[in-house]
Amino acid sequence: MEHVNQAVAITPEISFPHEPAPNTKKIWKAFWALLILTIAELALGLSHYAFHVQGWVLMFLKGLMIILSLSKAVYIVSIFMHLGDETRNLRMAILVPLISFAWFIFAFLWDGNAYRNMRNRYDVPAPTQQVAPAVVPEPGSLK
Amino acid sequence: MSTQIPAGYKWWTGGKSPYNVSYGKLMMWIFLMSDTFTFGGLIIAYGSIRLGHNYWPDANYVFDKFPFMGDANLPLAFVSLMTFILIMSSVTMVLAVHEGHKRNKKGVEKWLLWTILGGFLFLGCQAWEWTHLITHTHPVLIDGQIREIGATIRHNHFGPAVPGLMHDGHQVHLPGPVSFGNFFFGITGFHGFHVFTGVILNIIIYIRTLAGSFDRLGHYEMVEKVGLYWHFVDLVWVFVFLCFYLI
């Protein structure tokens, strides 16, 4: 058996199993990339705490953190999970259904935002600075 | 590797696997895809509910404690450590897979042990984090009365501050949104359950490696399959980290 240097026994259906990579250079490169990306994310996350940024700057920082997370996901999936070494058919079978997430995210976040707008327009505003004891209405009263 | 396929190769003419992977690996990928949609659904629901609120707790204030550091203000330090532990255990897992490709039994054993250790460390960190959130109480103004509450799925103390109201030297807050606790404990709990399952699977393949099952079988593909699951757990954490701690 020792002369067959392969991960899986060859069957007629499966023609080329993964060959072992010559060294672990690629893995450690991915590790450093992940570490640097995580530290960058952390710096961005802490910066809006330290500088109290608001408005479009905050949106920009959040967008940047999302992009950094997605690039971390690319490293994990393509190198650690070896999807980059698989056939194009398998890659597409896994990745194409995930495109539907674009619509899920858009639709549900839009919905949540619309809900907040309706709540602010039609509901009594939630007390944020109330210090006085709340008046509990008598059961059966109209107030 | 894909470089070995001749151009114009006919994948779909029958007699061969168009995906060119074994049944087990393909099924693991399909399972992970369905799990992606489960986690995606949970996280998108969280985003939707969060956008529906005018006020949401700032993670920098919620997660600012570190074990054995008392009341020191260390925002995101502990979750960064947890993230590092999980990335590190992912690296040791992929090294185990690499040794498996070379059929190096000793190497697989060594890296699997490190991975199992990383998994337990992560679970321990999560246990501490949950315990801290649940048991560390703060004064909260509820119906005109000040009460000391921790963060659970029923209530939490992460609401806006009540200006000028102090209690035992602590700023009094209003109750935070209930759904914060629901989603935080729900999603990190579901992820923690996945980590726990991954550790169990790692222990099983570690024992099978020790017993020489994979040498008799002639390949270490089982390490690869469990590795896929373990990396997926790390992948989910990337997005949990993003959605709960960073944004």
Image (cartoon, rainbow, N blue to C red):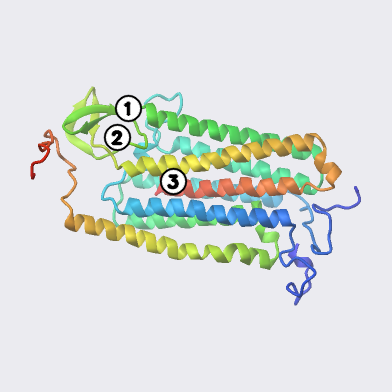
Which residue is at the far front? A140
Q: CA distance from mark 2 to mark 1?
A: 8 Å
Residue underneath mark 3: A43
Residue mark closest to the camera, 2 vs 3: 2
Residue B8 disc label: none
Residue found farthest to the left: A142
Task: For the N terminus of chain B, give its image quadrant.
Answer: bottom right
* Residue B119 visible in the shown view: yes
Q: Which residue is denoted by mark 2 in the rendering?
A: B157
Secondary structure beneath label 2? loop
Q: Chain of mark 3?
A: A
The chain carrying label 1 is B
What is the CA distance from the residue labelled 2 to the residue labelled 3?
26 Å
- Name which residue type carries label 3: Ala
- Name the residue at the bottom extreme: B8
- Image height of A117 relative to A36, above or below: below
What element does badge 3 sit on?
Answer: helix
Kindly identify the amino acid type of the residue bearing the numbered disc 1. Answer: Thr
At label 2, the amino acid type is: His
Residue under pointer 1? B137
Q: Chain of mark 2?
A: B
Q: Secondary structure at mark 1?
A: loop
Q: Residue B128 at x, y = what percent?
A: 47, 29
